[in-house]
């Protein structure tokens, strides 16, 4: 039973990590608590829902379409809401507030359009049978979540480390003013980072919606609190940290529920958050802000 | 006091709104106090919950009279603020905000798991002890005190901290002590507001003090601005009245509400009442 | 001020009774926006459908019912504001709703203070009608339904049970309390009690733990979304036909089949009504509802449909749009509707539990459990 519980924990943790990747990137580089992030997650899931249900796309086509679609939505919203504030050097409170108003409007609009009901992707987009190894059961959707998370983390780390673009993004994360002086077009980079986070959020929305069979307008909102825990424990802007923190959180929650008391699952997660903040405010893994990407 | 029937009807119909305006005004001030020293704490909803639950228990289980319960309702939140203050206030900016959200969620989990607090069923059958005058008297007193403090030496020190905490420290302001003081004051205001709310509506439940209300309280202060104590109260009033004015639009209501916040921030970045800030800038 | 309020009530009521009105104002408070809007929307559709028929004929010699449906967004304060607006400004003679038991605990004392009969159609928690003498409900409390369901499970050989519930909403918690008490009373052995959040999507830890204990049955008290999630994940974790799943009132929705599909097969739930009920009134309701709304009704719509008729009939029997008389008339309700024969107990709860049938999910649809 312990082995199945550990697997459960890793699978749950992978969904947390997947949600947090784009969140930590957006947070770390653009330095705003952008509450619209959860909306990109919901938007991705809904795009995939339409692509599969209405147009009969396969999941392999719907997934990239949803990711790109939410990436573009993220660029648009960032431009509409935050460029002005960034240009004026407005305090981070202003960005928090404007994105708060925006998500309220966006979720309500989405509920108006699609209704509040829970939906799911067509059951036949992916096999439902679990694969069994030595008594441990894992579904194909869960494999897809873990696989995609791994691929995305590797791709992002390669991008940050190995390309000029990545160097630019990291420079911007550390010293936006200096980056500007060095001739980096920060406005364009901000748009690009928005696209990347929206892309990651959208992909996460599709896969997590698929995995849990639950797609509805507020699904992104419901991930936000866990998302905060992961990006803080992992260190703001630290992609590898987000991955480890996500997995850790998943395992701890599952073990709490499995061996302690399921009612304490959330309390333990948030107690860890507070404990980390009290002792190591820049995250468990050292410096925050992308230095360790 | 006797009112003509139409006025009595009007007051009855809008009693909850009238109460909410005052209580949310107090909550906005509780937010203002921490923002005024440059700290973004999102623990106000948690403080309010502690005040609400502790006062409701005092009334329901200990049968204490309300004139004892109301002042006592700020004790638990204030002690909690003192206990978490020292480690938490080392943090700043978004870290502080998220730490306080985390604490709020831990408290919510406790409410859900403790049988004496009713779990998800909350506490019901709380007698209505709150009178309108109590709420507004406390609101006026709070505004007056904060106004006085803002115009004293302490107020200037707070302003200095908000602009640049390091410089303020060098100039001899004990930044940590001010921050802790502000957090405790904030907890007291929110705790009293929680007690007033609990004794105005018969019922309290754990989900009233979670993440969403925390963000709502923040938006009161941000919409109004923090130039003077009046500003956050005005923000609270606008955001409390909006859903009532927009009643009947169902989900359109959320869309309007959100858009108004967006437009206010984009075009009035210092809040609606930014008088004091502007004067300084000029 | 409080004193003058009491004095004002008879005055207002008298003026209401004497005024010749073409319309009788009735209010409803339901969740029409926000994350829980699905329930309120369904209830409103049920009320509207009933109103179509009622207003064709009229009550009190041809008056129409003017139904004002206010949105509570699932928020306590907005529910109270809605109640005060309906009673104080719209002068309604009765209130239907609110949607959730939590909201009723806040709204009930307000309407009860003004002596406005308030009829919950979906509030199943314990203690609802104890709020006051003007608080009614037409929904069967869980404590009437769950013992029937458990009896069916025992007849199938269930001896041990694990209980799961959403610990953060009143409806699920109260249903769980009932389920636990009923299981103990009927001699079932409870091997585990696990909780989750009503917005949770992952239940693997709790289910894996339960699987290790091998209970004959799993009882779930939660709204339909998490129940669907639990079932889907249970199948992934290898729970098969040998485990009897038992749902509370929240599971009794066609959405269970839509979301969980075949994973829900075999779940049993007690219900005052089901969509394939072989009864002409019910069949007509289902086809009318489908024609008007383009989708199938759930029990929330069915209960609301009956409640609207019950309230309309009570106003008619009261002989005047007078809330005091409507309350007395409501107590004498003897109505036969979609749910079957209906009367109130003196405690203002539904009197008869005879209508309770145990349903079983098969192929994504509910049918009578054999």
Image (spheres, rainbow, N blue to C red):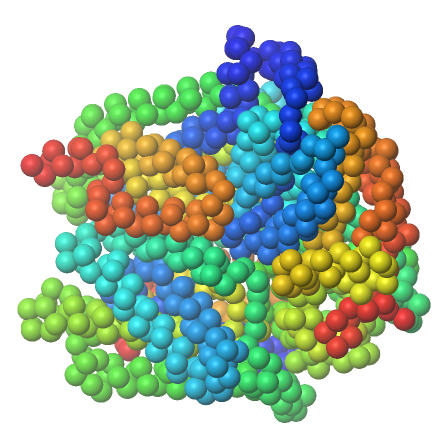
The vertical placement of C181 against A39, above or below, is above
Which x, y percent locates residue C150? 86, 61
Residue drawn at (39%, 68%) of the image: A40
Q: Is residue B142 left or right of residue B132?
A: left
Check the image and name the residue furthest to the right: C155
* Near-viewer residue (A33 or B239): B239
Q: Is residue C153 visible?
A: yes
Check the image and name the residue furthest to the bottom: A133
Q: Quadrant of residue A152?
A: bottom left
Which x, y percent locates residue B141? 36, 21
Q: Quadrant of the C terminus of chain B?
A: top left
* Near-viewer residue (A277 or C102): C102
Q: Is residue C57 left or right of residue A52?
A: right
Which x, y percent locates residue C120? 71, 42
Q: Is residue C146 visible?
A: no
Q: Quadrant of residue B37?
A: top left
Q: Is residue C199 left or right of residue B159?
A: right
Count of numbered badges drawn on the protein: 0
The vertical placement of B76 against C177, above or below, is above
Q: Quadrant of residue A64?
A: bottom left
* Near-viewer residue (B240 or B84): B240
The vertical placement of A160 against C180, above or below, is below
Residue drawn at (36%, 36%) of the image: B238
Residue drawn at (85%, 67%) of the image: C368
Residue drawn at (60%, 11%) of the image: C4
Which x, y percent locates residue B106? 51, 52
């Amino acid at each position: 039973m312990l082995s199945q519980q550990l697997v459960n924990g890793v699978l749950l943790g992978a969904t947390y990590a997947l949600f947090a990747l784009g969140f930590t990137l957006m947070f770390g580089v653009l330095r705003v608590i952008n509450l619209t992030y959860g909306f990109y997650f919901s938007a991705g899931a809904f795009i995939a829902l339409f692509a599969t249900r209405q147009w009969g796309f396969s999941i392999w086509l719907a997934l990239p379409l949803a990711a790109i679609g939410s990436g573009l939505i993220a660029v648009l919203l960032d431009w509409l809401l935050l460029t002005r504030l960034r240009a004026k050097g407005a305090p981070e409170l202003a960005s928090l507030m404007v994105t708060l108003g925006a998500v309220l409007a966006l979720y309500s609009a989405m509920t108006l359009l699609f209704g509040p009901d829970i939906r799911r992707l067509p059951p036949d987009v992916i096999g439902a049978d679990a694969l069994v190894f030595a008594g441990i059961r894992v579904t194909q959707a869960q494999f897809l979540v873990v696989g995609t998370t791994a691929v995305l983390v590797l791709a992002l780390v390669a991008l940050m480390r190995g390309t000029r673009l990545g160097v630019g993004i990291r420079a911007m994360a550390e010293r936006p003013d200096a980056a500007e002086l060095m001739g980096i077009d920060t406005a364009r980079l901000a748009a690009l980072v928005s696209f990347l986070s929206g892309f990651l959020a959208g992909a996460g929305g599709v896969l997590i919606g698929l995995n849990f069979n639950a797609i509805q307008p507020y699904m992104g909102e419901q991930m936000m609190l866990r998302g905060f825990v992961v990006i803080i424990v992992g260190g703001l802007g630290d992609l590898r940290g987000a991955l480890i923190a996500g997995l850790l959180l998943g395992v701890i929650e599952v073990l709490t529920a499995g061996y302690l008391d399921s009612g304490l699952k959330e309390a333990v997660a948030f107690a860890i958050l507070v404990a980390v903040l009290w002792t190591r405010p820049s995250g468990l893994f050292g410096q925050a802000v992308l230095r360790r990407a | 006091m006797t009112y003509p029937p139409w006025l009595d009807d009007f007051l009855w119909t809008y009693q909850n709104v009238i109460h909410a305006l005052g209580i949310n005004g107090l909550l906005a001030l509780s937010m203002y106090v921490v923002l005024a020293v440059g700290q973004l704490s999102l623990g106000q909803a948690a403080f309010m919950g502690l005040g609400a639950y502790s006062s409701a228990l005092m009334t329901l289980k200990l049968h204490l009279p309300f004139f004892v319960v109301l002042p006592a309702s700020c004790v638990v939140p204030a002690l909690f603020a003192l206990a978490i203050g020292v480690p938490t206030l080392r943090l700043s900016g978004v870290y502080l905000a998220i730490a306080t959200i985390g604490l709020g969620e831990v408290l919510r989990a406790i409410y859900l798991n403790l049988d004496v607090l009713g779990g998800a069923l909350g506490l019901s059958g709380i007698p209505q002890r709150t009178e309108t005058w109590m709420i507004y008297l406390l609101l006026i007193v709070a505004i007056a005190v904060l106004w006085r403090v803002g115009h004293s030496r302490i107020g200037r020190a707070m302003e200095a901290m908000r602009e640049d905490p390091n410089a303020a420290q060098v100039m001899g302001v004990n930044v940590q002590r001010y921050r802790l003081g502000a957090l405790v004051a904030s907890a007291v205001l929110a705790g009293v507001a929680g007690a007033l709310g609990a004794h105005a509506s018969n019922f309290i439940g754990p989900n009233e003090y979670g993440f969403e209300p925390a963000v709502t309280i923040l938006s009161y202060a941000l919409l109004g601005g923090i130039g003077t104590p009046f500003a956050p109260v005005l923000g609270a009033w606008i955001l409390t009245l909006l859903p009532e004015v927009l009643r009947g639009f169902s989900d359109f209501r959320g869309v309007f509400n959100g858009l108004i916040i967006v437009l206010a921030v984009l075009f009035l970045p210092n809040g609606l009442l930014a008088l004091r800030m502007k004067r300084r800038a000029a | 001020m409080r004193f003058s309020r009491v004095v004002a009530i008879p005055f207002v009521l008298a003026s209401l009774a004497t005024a010749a009105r073409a319309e009788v104002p009735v209010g409803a408070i339901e969740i029409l926006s926000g994350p829980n809007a699905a329930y309120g929307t369904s209830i409103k559709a049920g009320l509207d459908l009933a109103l179509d028929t009622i207003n064709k004929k009229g009550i009190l010699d041809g008056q129409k019912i003017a139904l004002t449906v206010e949105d509570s967004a699932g928020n306590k304060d907005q529910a109270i504001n809605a109640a005060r607006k309906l009673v104080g400004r719209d002068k309604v003679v009765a209130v239907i709703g609110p949607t959730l038991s939590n909201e009723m605990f806040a709204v009930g004392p307000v309407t009860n203070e003004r002596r406005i009969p308030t009829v919950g159609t979906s509030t199943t928690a314990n203690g609802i009608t104890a709020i006051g003498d003007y608080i009614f409900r037409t929904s069967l409390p869980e404590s009437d339904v769950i013992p029937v369901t458990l009896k069916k499970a025992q007849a199938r050989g269930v001896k041990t049970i694990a209980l799961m519930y959403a610990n953060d909403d009143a409806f699920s918690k109260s249903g769980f309390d009932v389920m636990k008490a009923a299981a103990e009373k009927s001699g079932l052995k409870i091997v585990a009690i696990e909780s989750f959040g009503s917005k949770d999507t992952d239940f693997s830890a709790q289910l894996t733990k339960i699987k290790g204990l091998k209970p004959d049955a799993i009882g779930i008290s939660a709204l339909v979304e998490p129940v669907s999630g639990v079932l889907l994940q249970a199948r992934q974790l290898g729970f098969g036909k040998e485990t009897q799943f038992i749902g509370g009132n929240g599971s009794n929705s066609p959405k269970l089949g839509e979301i969980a599909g075949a994973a829900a097969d075999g779940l049993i739930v007690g219900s005052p009504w089901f969509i394939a009920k072989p009864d002409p009134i019910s069949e007509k309701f289902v086809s009318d509802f489908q024609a008007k709304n383009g989708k199938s009704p759930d029990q929330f719509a069915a209960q609301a449909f009956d409640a609207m008729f019950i309230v309309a009939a009570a106003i008619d029997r009261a002989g005047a749009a007078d809330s005091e008389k409507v309350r007395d008339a409501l107590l004498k309700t003897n109505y036969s509707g979609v749910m079957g024969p209906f009367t109130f107990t003196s405690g203002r709860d539904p009197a008869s539990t005879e209508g309770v049938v145990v349903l079983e999910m098969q192929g994504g649809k509910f049918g009578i459990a054999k």
